[in-house]
Every structure is written in structure tokens, then in C-alpha cells.
Image (cartoon, rainbow, N blue to C red):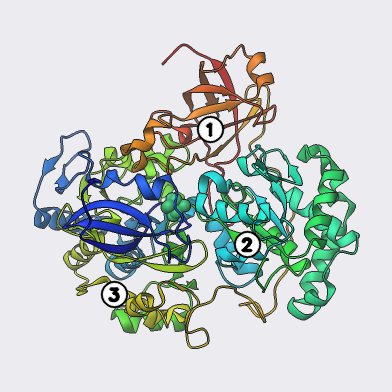
Amino acid sequence: LITMGQADHSVITTCAYCGVGCSFRAEMQGDELVRMVPNQDGHANHGHSCVKGRFAIGYATHPDRITTPMIREKITDPWRVVSWEEAIAHTAREFKRIQAEHGKFSIGGITSSRCTNEETYLVQKLVRAGFGNNNVDTCARVCHSPTGYGLKQTLGESAGTQDFDSVLHADVIMVIGANPTDGHPVFASQMKRRLRGDDGRDPARLIVIDPRRIDIIKTPHVQADHHLKLRPGTNVAVLNALAHVVVTEGLVDEAFVAARCEPEAFDKWRAFVADPAQSPEAMETELGVPAAEIRAAARLYATGGNGAIYYGLGVTEHSQGSTAVMAIANLAMATGNLGRRGVGVNPLRGQNNVQGSCDMGSFPHELPGYRHVSDAEVRGLFEREWNVSLHDEPGLRIPNMFEAALDGEFKGLYIEGEDIGQSDPNTRHVTAALSAMECVVVQDLFLNETAKYAHVFLPGSSFMEKDGTFTNAERRISRVRRIMAPKAGYADWEITQLLSNAMGYPMHYTHPSQIMDEIARLTPTFTGVSFDRIDELGSIQWPCNETHPDGTPTMHVDEFVRGKGKFMLTGYVPTREKVNGRFPLLLTTGRILSQYNVGAQTRRTPNSTWHDEDRLEIHPHDAEERGIAHDDWVGVESRAGDTVLRARITDRVQPGVIYTTFHFPGSGANVITTDNSDWATNCPEYKVTAVQVTRVTQP
Ligand code: SF4
């Protein structure tokens, strides 16, 4: 894709990989991309980038790209190339047939956090207005849905509280269940600047809570003060133990709590965490962390000045993911670490537009702006704008769609930009559900794992081929600008519109800016957002409205979005995923710097010359016990399935815990993850799987 020629013009756009949302200048020669240069004026990255955003872009013109629509009657049939007219007409006919035979709730759609805000908005509009139900969900279901739930309950808004630059004002940084160096590298560099004290001030102190020794714990001139190396699945217990120390050692910011929080809920919470059963000493064995270490970390966070918490999927992807998010918010409220620069509760979002796909109403229970579908006033607003009557009950979440498919009640699925056949847990269960459907429509760049079970393939567009916006982890809305024509003729939003028209619900947009204008008309936190305004300011952090015309870097400054902050009780319930004689090890998962999620993009770039397979990290003690040497092939078996990986022996993981990534379909980490999920949101428990590991011969 990258030519070595001389650029004759450039276009500012936004990286389509992680939730940092770096701004790039695409240098062009005619309609050929010469190179991607990090934008010095980029508000999220200030001229920095990582190896993905700058170099891993060749997937957009990779020969694997499918550029023509295809259909087939049965998934065992070969694909037949058809015109766009035939593909769209066939899909609409099939969806209408299914609804006529099985009822209007028998079909649904899945949006993607890789697509633009405008595209995800259109998918949920198609489902609600065109399909006539609320069966729409997003891949955020499997990553940060607990963030949406937990922060809404406690603070009143389903989003992080700070901008990235806020970390430069932190005195104590707590990283929980996130690996910024690999997952959010440009933000990690900013964090490290503060941890090194590059600004001449005393370096910020660092607390890391993670079962594995991640890089930021010890990098040049950075050494974590505390690494709480807990057992996978015990986040809530350690957060309650930290809170116990804060409450019982008189470290609560009483003035903040009295002024900003609901007193009754606080009193109940205080009594709950003060119980000796929550103490570090009581939980020491369960956590595998010395009580004294927990006490020291709690004192540092509560008394060290501005305390900022950053967390990731190591918090959310648990059976108590939502509880852990609420426990983090409780801790921040109790210590007064909210509402100003340098503090806060900051989810590090995995994909480029996780925040945006959630904001856009991609959940089955919420219209855009996190408003429940049962709210008649809100529904009326959308009904008038969309000229349609909307259903008032939540639809199916992704796992519920699978269950309904296996029960014979859910028959048709439109999937835009999401490879559920690889990314969702317990692959066997997912593919059985897909196989039970009568019309699976995949709209994507490549014939991915899900497409193996599809009846219609609609070729999608890369971020270079369309206009729109992404919203990063700090609520920053940035422009994505088209630098080349769509390879298959249409941008994704246009395909959704074609399908909606064919389904009988007309849409008439001629540019994505019109979609954003509609979002702004309907969503109070977006009323000041438009393409023109983003062009003028460079980017905008929502809320952007009459009160905050230039956006909002720090939320909850004078009061919480819900008014008073609400402490929630966060009782620890151990995961159902238990080790035993047959499955004696706990598997947890994560990412590596050079690859991105299921790898559909990065595997088709030179980044794969650095990492071309998922490896299993195992502690020397566990390896020796099993006769496993470095680079040996090992079988990994769980209650859900089995796979084969190559071993990397390392003391990064503790005895009893193994670790792998999930970037390559062959090894299939999700073949072995289970159906366990968060009690509130069904976010899968990817981070805890009981397994056995044995040495095998090469597969
Ligand atoms: Fe892209 Fe994230 Fe890398 Fe920035 S840090 S260049 S957004 S992958």
C-alpha cells in the first residue's frame, strides 16, 4: 500500500486500531497513500504513534480483500459472485421471509467498534426502525459493557472521567487489569513520562494490580512501588480490601464524600467494607497477595496526592466485571479522587471506537445517549425523528441471540465488521448457533471465521475509504476522512442504507455528516457536535452542548452526572471457574503490541514478521512438572474445548497461572474460554479459564 513516492497532498484522519485514537496525516500522491505520519497537532497523541497505526495499514489493499458481494443457499455451497442489487435484494427478501415465518423478533444485527459512529448509529437504526425490534448489540458486549453499567450506576455516565493529558497531573497512578505498553502504547508513553518525572517534578508513584508481570512495572527509570500479583478472578476482593484499609485507617476524604455523595449509600458501603471479612488479612490466601502489600498500596493511593486509576479488560472480562468497575468508582469517590485533573476512573478501551459504538445506542436496551428503550419520552423523540413506532422492551444480547438460535427462535443475523466466530468465547457454541440460523449476513473486509457460516457476504470498507468519526477512550470525537474510493464501491454506511431501503424503511443520507447532525439533534451530550465544529476544533470530547460548547476534558467537576455519587455494595463472589485435579491451572489472556485483536488486519501486514503465532506463557515450575521445554508444543484443555500452542517458559506468570494472546485463528484461544459471563452485562469471563496443559507432538 505504501509507495515511496513524493506526496502531493495530505489528509488528516484517525487511526483505526486502539482506543487511544491517534491522529495521522495521510500523505498522498494522487489517490495512492505514500505514508502515514503522526499528526503533531493530534490532541490524543501529540505527534506520537505506534507500530500499528503508522505501519500496519497494508491490509487495506491486501489481495485477501473481497470486493464483490457473494451469496450461497447453504454454507456448504461455494460462494456465487453477484451484483450489489442482487445481494441486497436477496438479503432483504430472506430477512422478510424469516420475519413472516418466525415473527419480527427472529432477526437482529451486530455492530462493530471498528466502524464509525455514523455506521454504528445506522445499524441500530436499521434494527429498531427497519427490523422493528431491539435485537441489536455491539462487540463492546464482550469487552467494556461492564464499564457502561458500573460507571452509570455510581457516577451517572458510562464513560471515562478524564482526558489522556490528565495523567501528567497525577501523583499516584494505579493500573488495574490493563497492559498499556502493549494495548495502548502511545498513552503508555505519556504515562511513563509522568512516572519518570520528565517534567522535573517528583515522579508519580505506581501501583499495578495484575496476575502477570507486565512491562510497565519495570521499564527504564520506572519501577512500580507495588505489584499486587493477585490470582485471576479476585479483582473485587482486592478492591474491597483496599477500601477496607481506606475506611478503617481513617483515610476517607470525608469532606468530598459529604459534599458529593449520597450519604445513606455511603454509610452502607462504609459498614460493608469495614467488616473484618473484607480485610487484606482475611483475603490474603484467596488473593495470593501479602496483606501488608495491600495495606501499603491503599495508603499510597489514598494519601499520595492526585490518584488516577486506569483499568482495562482485566477488570471487565470477569463474572464480576461490573462489580469490579463499581468497586473502582467507590474507591475513587471515597478518597476524593474525582472531578479534577490528575485523578479519575479511566477505562482504557480496546478498539478504536468502543466508546462510540456504545454511545450510539448499539445495546439492545439503550437508544443513543444511554437512554433506556422503555422511556416513553425518549422513544417519542426518536419516533418523531425516524417516523416509525419503536418497540419498548430490550432486545437480545449477543449471547441471548446464540441461545435463541439454538432454540430455533432466532434465524437471521446482520453482522457489520465483527468476527464473532473468532472473538467470542466458547467457539463451538458460537458456530453451532450460527449454523442453526437461516440467513447470516457478514459485512467485512475479509472472509473471516464467521463468514464460514454466512449465506451472504457484503464487502465492507476500510477506514481509508470513508468519512465519519471515531470516539476514543477519553470521549474524544475525531474525524475519519476518506482518502481513497471504497474498493467494493460502497462505504459501510451506504450498504446499511441500501439494506434498510430494501427492507422497506427508507433512509436518504448523502453524506455521513448528515447522520452526525441527526445524532446531535437526538442526543443531549452531542448537541454541539458536527463535522464543521470538529474541523474547527480538531476534535471534541463529549459532552458538547450549550453548557460545554468546546467539549469536556474532565467530567463530574462540580457534581456527578447523576447528581450525588452513589456508593454501590460490591460483595465478592468467587468465579464458578474452579481449578481441580483435572484442570489445575488458570488461563488468562491479553494482547501484544504488534497485533490487534483477532488479527484480521495486522496479520495481513509486516507486523506478523515480529509475532506470527499466539504463545502460551507458563511458569518454569509448572513447565518442569509437566516435562515442557521452551518452544515445545503443548495441548491446552478446558471444560469448553482444547487447542494447541507453543510454550514460552517465563516467570512473568506466577505458578498456577498461564497466559496467552488471541490474535491468530489457528490456535484459537477462544476455543477454550467458557460461557461464564458478567452477572449484569453478559460480558464473557475471558480472563479466567481452568485448564490442563500437557506436552504434545507438533500438530
Ligand atoms: Fe493507533 Fe493505538 Fe497505536 Fe495510536 S497507540 S497509533 S491509536 S494503535
Q: Is residue 364 visible?
A: no
Helix, strand or loop under label 1: strand
Measured in 3D between alpha carbons, the distance from the residue under mark 2 to the one under mark 3, in whole angstroms, is 32 Å
416 left or right of 544 in image:
left
Helix, strand or loop under label 2: helix
Q: Position of residue 190 (x, y in %)?
A: 57, 56
Measured in 3D between alpha carbons, the distance from the residue under mark 2 to the one under mark 1, in whole angstroms, is 29 Å
Task: Classify mark 1 as within 8 Å of ligand 1 or not, answering yes or no.
Answer: no
Q: Residue at x 87, y 58 (%)?
A: 274
Q: Which mark is residue 513?
A: 3
Question: Eyeballing the image, is 179 above or below 133?
Answer: above
According to the picture, the residue beneath numbered tag 1 turns out to be 660
Q: Residue at x 69, y 54 (%)?
A: 174
Q: Position of residue 557 (x, y in %)?
A: 65, 78
Q: Position of residue 512 (x, y in %)?
A: 27, 71
Task: Classify mark 2 as within 8 Å of ligand 1 or not, answering yes or no.
Answer: no
Q: Classify 10 Å Cα crowding around label 3: few (below 14), some (14-19), many (20 and above).
A: some
Q: Which mark is residue 167?
A: 2
Q: Which mark is residue 309?
A: none
Tag 1: residue type? Thr
